[in-house]
Image (cartoon, rainbow, N blue to C red):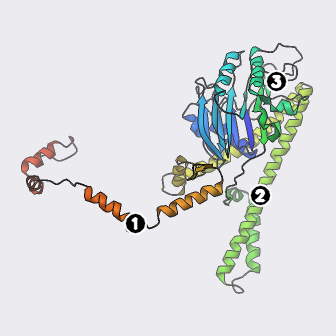
């Protein structure tokens, strides 16, 4: 299971929002803890698209603060309760991941020394059971020597001391520092002070340390902050079925069109309808051309991913050199690589939004698959993570859940009519029902023809200008 914590520094612009979601998807995030969303309560719902199945958030305003927790579709997470901060500083979400309880927290601490906010967070968090996974921008280095690039010594802030004390009391571990005790690496670059610092933390319960596979910083180019990625061993791994779709981007590439045309000509050159029935040739052609399209699409996707990986690897190397020597040349190299990655991710986001706009233009006002999918998003998730069995026990096994539903509906729709079934209770119920009757006088009034006075009264009761007059 991949968890990513990231200060995205505002996500109001639709292109940046798409880039953020694409970045998280490309790194296979199943849970994303976001800070500084700068979205209102309603605008946070814009994050519930694409791979995002559940979205929990705490808002402040459209210009400041705001945190969110995004959970991937079909993840075995069952929501139980949540707690939010009225100032948009943190959100706590408690639930179950498969059969195990878990509490997720996204934090954006103030950029002033405010230990009271940290105390309030951990006091509220203490109400929820562990294990805890806390990710966020704490806006203060815990170690002023290892977590700052500046050579000037600075005292540890009161907020940092409160965080360290709370970690000891709650049995929490800074997992990145735990795995890299002697490494200098930073998550934030301040353009104002031309300095680097490590202020983005992943705090997890010590009981989860044995499940951690790795923890590292991802390339920093969309935001001023590096995403922090933690991978845990998955206790439950549910895979959804794959649905193949034609990659329409192939039709925009001349080389791809040429290869597809050549494949079609080659197929019908060796497989003509005179040697085989037409229906068999047609089915074989569809399978062949689909394989060709998949190969072309996969090749383009791998080339794009390799280009992104090479740029990200180069950016990580440039940042490492910058950590060692904060010179103008190193800063320029980092800025150049960040610009290339920004252009690459922006072009991908723009293409995706262009496809979305054209799809809405063509199908938005018509009943069809798009409307069905829009309505489906408003319904409950397809995944039923658990079910209570007839003996009162709670099962989280997908096989047991399916079998229980099958048995329930088989019993529900089985024939129960007969002397020992529903006949007796139904007859007794109907015999005891008193059906009201109307009198002969009322019946005569209801069956009488309409009078002139009744018609005039009905006309007078109509809205002015909406019907004819009495004449």
**Residue, x 54% and y 34% (percent of image)?**
42
In this image, 112 relative to 173: left or right?
left
Label 2: few (<14), some or many (≥20) within 10 Å? few
In this image, 153 relative to 452: left or right?
right
Q: SS of the residue at dot 1?
A: loop
In space, the residues marked 1 and 3 are separated at their CA atoms by 77 Å
Q: Name the residue under label 2.
A: 298
In space, the residues marked 2 and 1 are separated at their CA atoms by 63 Å
First reached walking from the N terminus: tag 1 or tag 3? 3
First reached walking from the N terminus: tag 2 or tag 3? 3
Instruction: Find the residue positioned furthest to the bottom.
Output: 274
Q: Quadrant of residue 152?
A: top right
Q: Are marks 2 and 1 in contact (CB under 8 Å)?
A: no
Relative to residue 150, is residue 437 depicted above or below? below
Label 3: few (<14), some or many (≥20) within 10 Å? many
In this image, 293 relative to 450: left or right?
right
Q: Mark 3 points at which residue?
A: 197
In this image, 175 relative to 348: left or right?
right
Residue 378 percent location from the top left of the image: 52, 47
Q: SS of the residue at dot 2?
A: helix
Identify the mark at residue 420; answer none if there is no mark: 1
Residue 56 percent location from the top left of the image: 61, 36
Q: Quadrant of residue 276?
A: bottom right
Residue 312 percent location from the top left of the image: 83, 40
User: Nearer the observer, disc 2 or disc 1?
Assistant: 1
Q: Residue 88 or 317: which is nearer the viewer?
A: 88
- From this viewpoint, is residue 465 visible? yes
């Amino acid at each position: 299971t991949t968890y990513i914590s990231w200060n995205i520094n505002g996500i109001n612009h639709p292109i940046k929002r798409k880039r953020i979601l694409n970045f998280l998807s490309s790194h296979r995030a199943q849970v994303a803890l976001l800070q500084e969303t700068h979205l209102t309560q309603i605008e946070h719902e814009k994050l519930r698209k694409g791979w995002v199945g559940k979205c929990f958030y705490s808002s402040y305003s459209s210009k400041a603060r705001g945190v969110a927790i995004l959970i991937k579709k079909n993840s075995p997470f069952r929501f139980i309760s949540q707690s939010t901060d009225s100032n948009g500083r943190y959100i706590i979400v408690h639930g179950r991941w498969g059969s195990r309880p878990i509490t997720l927290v996204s934090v954006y601490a103030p950029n002033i020394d405010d230990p009271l906010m940290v105390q309030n967070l951990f006091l509220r968090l203490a109400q929820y059971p562990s294990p805890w996974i806390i990710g966020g921008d704490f806006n203060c280095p815990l170690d002023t020597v290892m977590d700052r690039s500046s050579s000037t010594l600075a005292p540890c802030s009161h907020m940092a001391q409160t965080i360290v004390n709370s970690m000891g009391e709650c049995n929490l571990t800074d997992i990145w520092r735990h795995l890299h005790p002697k490494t200098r690496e930073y998550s934030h670059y301040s353009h104002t002070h031309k300095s680097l610092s490590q202020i983005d933390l992943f705090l997890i319960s010590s009981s989860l340390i044995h499940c951690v596979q790795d923890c590292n910083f991802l390339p920093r180019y969309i935001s001023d902050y590096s995403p922090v990625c933690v991978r845990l061993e998955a206790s439950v791994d549910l895979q959804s079925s794959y649905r193949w779709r034609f990659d329409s981007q192939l039709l925009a590439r001349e080389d791809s069109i040429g290869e597809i045309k050549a494949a079609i000509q080659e197929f019908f050159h060796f497989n003509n309808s005179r040697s085989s029935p037409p229906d068999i040739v047609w089915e074989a052609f569809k399978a062949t051309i689909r394989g060709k399209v998949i190969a072309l699409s996969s090749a383009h996707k791998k080339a794009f991913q390799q280009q992104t990986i090479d740029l990200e690897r180069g950016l990580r190397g440039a940042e490492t050199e910058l950590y060692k020597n904060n010179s103008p040349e190193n800063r320029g190299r980092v800025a150049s690589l960040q610009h290339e990655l920004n252009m690459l991710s922006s072009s991908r986001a723009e293409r995706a939004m262009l496809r979305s706009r054209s799809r809405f233009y063509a199908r938005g006002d018509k009943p069809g698959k798009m409307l069905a999918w829009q309505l489906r998003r408003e319904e409950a998730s397809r995944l039923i993570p658990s079910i209570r069995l007839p003996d009162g026990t709670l099962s989280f096994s997908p096989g047991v859940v399916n079998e229980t539903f099958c048995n329930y509906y088989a019993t529900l729709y089985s024939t129960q009519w007969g002397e020992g079934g529903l006949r007796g209770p139904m007859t007794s119920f109907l015999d005891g029902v008193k059906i009201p009757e109307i009198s002969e006088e009322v019946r005569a009034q209801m069956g009488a023809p309409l009078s002139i006075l009744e018609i005039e009264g009905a006309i007078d009761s109509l809205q002015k200008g909406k019907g004819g007059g009495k004449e």
